[in-house]
Image: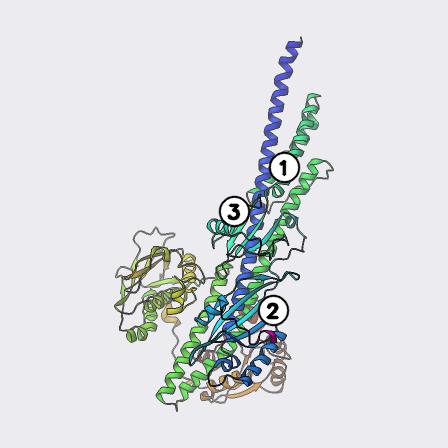
Amino acid sequence: MRSLRAKLILPFILGTLSLTLLLVWYTYSSARKAMEDAMIIISESKTNHAASSMALLFKSASSSVQNLVADPHVISAVSPETRGRASWDQATEWLETLTQSNEYYRDLLIVDRSGVCVASSNPGHTGVYFGDSPHVIRALGGMYTFGEPSVGKVTKKLSITVAGPVDTEHGIMGAFTMVYDLPSIVDYKVNDSFDSQTISTALLAPNGFFAAHKDMSIMGNKARTYPDLYKALLAAAGERGERVQYVMDDEEYIGYAKMDPSSRWMVVTSGKEGEVFAPATRTGGIVLAISLFFLVVISLLVLPVANRLLSSLFSLVGYAKKVSEGELEEELIVKDRNDELGTLQDALKSLVMSLRRMLLETQEASRMKGQFLANMSHEIRTPLNVILGLAHLSLRDGGMSEKQRGYMEKTQMAAKSLLGLINDVLDISKVEAGMLSMDHIPFNLRETAENTLAIHTETAQGKGIILSLDYDSQLPEFFIGDPLRIGQVLNNLLSNALKFTSRGEVAVTCRLDRDAVPEAPGTVGVVCSVKDSGIGMSPETCEKLFQPFTQADASITRQFGGTGLGLAISARLVALMHGEFTVSSIEGEGSTFSFSMVLEQDSSNGASLEAEEISEATFEQLGIQGKRILIAEDNPLNQLIIQELIAPSGADMTVVDNGQEAVEAIKAGRYDLVLMDMQMPVMGGLEATRIIRTLPGVEELPIIAFTANAMDEDKVTGLAGGMTDYLTKPVEPARLLRMLRVWLADR
């Protein structure tokens, strides 16, 4: 009987034990995978957040130096005809004022051509020789450069040195150096989430120096550097970022790393593998203990209890597996338990809540970035409006010599170029945030290409380059789509082609894509190409082209200029039109950039375009003499420009300095149109518009926003607040003319 009992019991026990071990292994593997994926998601988010903050701070420091080197105090301190004790004292006083007004400026120095400090916010540096400092040497050689980072021994504050050349009419006569205290990029004192104890973000300089690290004995310690670790992380992650595993001080780490291209610092968020996967090990141990308990209970024939416990366990395992696959929206069915399964349940719930919190923090960071870009755009557009407006008025009114006219036209061209750069930065931000929308309107593709070529005709003729368009006879001309964005892509490609071509030809081709499979009835595949006979590129260079803020190499930026945004934006615009970019190039022979699109044909064959045409006119021909226009604008120069632009129309204009005065003026008299700035002292334009809309008799009064707030959401807010139309600064005379015709002449 014993033998029979053994034969009956032993297979049952062995089978149940095997199943238990399999369950433990599966649970441990799933929990480990869930922990690993969660850790990588959080590490990537923290790494990208820190890298974005670093890029912004380094760009801010570099921009500050580029602005300060052109200041008259700096030029006067090193110029041969003005340098001396008086100019040095003035410069020193100015530098001290700057450091006192900006908490991040630790020290500012002006070094002359011989390497001697002639002025500094720290009097102890004056007269000291800095000519052997690497960053000063590079600055005197004409480069803007960053020095090695440093960390305060007591404060643990991270500082960088930024230097730039002081370029005078006599050449480079000195260097300007800034010691810049960076705000806290990584805060190791905050422990408000489950991951803060196991993973942390570190900043590793190219020389292996940890500028930031959770271990304070490593952070800022130049005696402990890890150059081999930097090389390994750079090879594994690079600028795009990647999951990494590495060994440091005999400890194995896992996390996510990414190189910041502006500083070439490596941002790595990681944790010790033993600590990262400790919850999975504990979970495996808990499951093993529970499973053994189940084995005893099952052996005692308590199957109903075992089944309920196993059901709960499998539910948690299934939920952990879904979390590991990225399904964070599903809610965990919480049961009130005080056993090991309850511990596992709480751990999984805490994990999902932390992941959701990280996603919200990422979205908040994106919102702050958008707010920064909006403020930057507003602050730059306001003085740009003055520059472009005064240039237009000067060219319109005449009375200048040909030489002066040439200077003014170049000023206007440079200001428009700066405006294009601002628009590029806003576009790339919208694309990355998924907020860029495409228009769906009728347009003529041939006309769009011809108009784009016309913009560059003068440049091509000036360089002796043949500019041509070949439009496929089998390709329709009329489509439904976004002509502005298509023209933007063609304009970027033509600008680059003419920039890098000194002789020969630049040819634009538009042809039917016969290999494209129509996505829907009435759609057509289109391929547009721009071919040049310029300097060409290597295959390695072609791979870098579509990354934001990237040029082929540093010499390209110095020789030809550019931000590296044009192609990155173009590639994303083409992707939104369900197309792709291709590049072929041979060094020394030229390049061909092609992009495909899927466009819907215009069934009206251009009839809708003819209905939308509006004839042009001049301000004198508007026919609005005697019309009363109220201008609410707080900037005196902007007031002057808008009045001078409208003056030839004969309209009667009244100017007020803020929204409160605009409301009082509307109450006191009748006006036919209001130009309202959005941001003004006392009362802003949006608040003033809301008040005006409540006044009797002015419900139909056209109120046009005249503002430097250029973001799409600003326009939506303005129109929702009661404004009739939206005009952004810098104001284009043609757009202002059309606005006045629509809201005054045609009514």
Is 567 or 488 nearer to us in this picture? Answer: 567
Say whether disc 1 or disc 2 marks the residue closer to the N-terminus.
Answer: 2
Residue at position x 56%, y 86% from top? Answer: 655
| Residue 674 position in % (x across, y down) | 54, 81
Q: Is any atom of residue 327 visible in this view?
A: no
Q: Mark 3 = which residue? A: 244
Q: Secondary structure at mark 1?
A: helix
Magenta segment: 121-131
Q: Mark 3 to mark 1: distance in Å?
A: 21 Å
Residue 284 higher or lower than 586, as above or below: above
Q: Is residue 675 visible?
A: yes
| Location of the N terminus (image quadrant) | top right
Kindly identify which numbered label has been placed on residue 281: 1
CB within 8 Å, label 3 to label 2: no
Q: Amino acid at mark 1?
A: Thr
Q: SS class of the residue under badge 3? A: strand
Q: Please state which of residues 238 and 625 is positioned toward the viewer in this rendering.
A: 238
Q: At which x and y percent is residue 90?
A: 57, 83
Is 129 magenta? The answer is: yes
For badge 3, the amino acid type reads Val
Q: Nearer the viewer, residue 134 or 404?
A: 134
Disc 2: which residue: 104
Query: Does residue 579 sit above or below 95 in this rendering?
Result: above
Residue type at numbered disc 2: Tyr
Judge depth for marks 1 and 2 and give the one in front.
2
Q: Which is nearer the N-term, disc 3 or disc 2?
A: 2
Q: Tag 1 or tag 3, which sits nearer the N-term?
A: 3
